[in-house]
Image (cartoon, grey):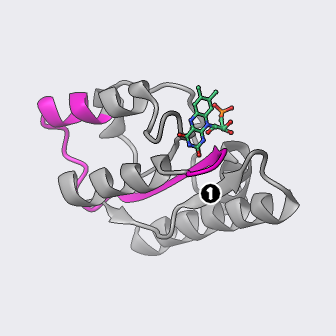
Amino acid sequence: MATAIAEGAKSISNVEVELDYHVDAEELGKFDAVLVGAPTYHHDMPMDTKKLFEEAAEKGINLKGKIAAAFGSYGWSGEAPKLVIEIMKNKFEMQVAEPPLLARDVPDQNMLSTCRNLGKRVAESLIHAA
Ligand SMILES: Cc1cc2nc3c(=O)[nH]c(=O)nc-3n(C[C@H](O)[C@H](O)[C@H](O)COP(=O)(O)O)c2cc1C
């Protein structure tokens, strides 16, 4: 899903895309848009994702107004991306593209195409805002 989103974003010229498995809280501030992949484990987001946002809050990283989105695969309940979005909106006042993208088990071609579209949409909005 992340790769497909990155592909979509890269299809827009003058947009730089960084696809990271892990980022430090301080690094979040350097991006114009932050799209977070979060699979659901035990009805929650992964511990690393939670820690990232907790650390960003503790360190006072300003993410206000940055474009954001969340996505992830899941097995049966899929809470993680919705929880990520709540934090992005309510804690960091990010400008969130909703709804989150959820793929049951493995994303099919349809979902991958939706992911590409999300990446493209976000990249286009950055270009228009520049
Ligand atoms: C220990 C464990 C707990 C899980 N808990 C949930 C859950 O609470 N809700 C859910 O929708 N899926 C749950 N899943 C399924 C995963 O979300 C699903 O397999 C997802 O595709 C994993 O993504 P990943 O391979 O990127 O980590 C769980 C899977 C495991 C192994």
In this view, the residue in front, 65 or 1, is 1
Task: Name the residue rendered at 53%, 65% in the picture.
Answer: 122
Label 1 beta carbon within 8 A of ligand 1: no
The residue labelled by disc 1 is 102
Task: Name the residue rendered at 34%, 33% in the picture.
Answer: 50
Circle count: 1
- Residue 77 rendering spot, x and y as whole percentages: 56, 51
Asked if one can make out residue 71 in the rendered structure from this viewpoint, the answer is yes
- Residue 98 rendering spot, x and y as whole percentages: 47, 70
Tell me the quadrant of ligand 1.
top right
- Is 57 included in the stretch rendered in magenta? yes
Query: From the viewer's perspective, is 58 left or right of 63?
Result: left
In this view, the residue in front, 100 or 115, is 100
Does 32 sit above or below residue 67? above
Query: From the viewer's perspective, is 56 left or right of 102?
Result: left
Part of the protein shown in magenta? 53-77
- Residue 30 rendering spot, x and y as whole percentages: 35, 40
In this view, the residue in front, 95 or 9, is 95
* Residue type, mark 1 in image: Leu
Label 1 secondary element: strand
- Is 97 included in the stretch rendered in magenta? no
- Residue 128 rendering spot, x and y as whole percentages: 47, 75
Does 46 sit above or below residue 38? above
Image quadrant where residue 39 sits:
top right
Does 24 sit above or below residue 73? above
Image quadrant where residue 105 sits:
top right
Does 93 sit above or below residue 50? below
The C terminus lies in quadrant: bottom left
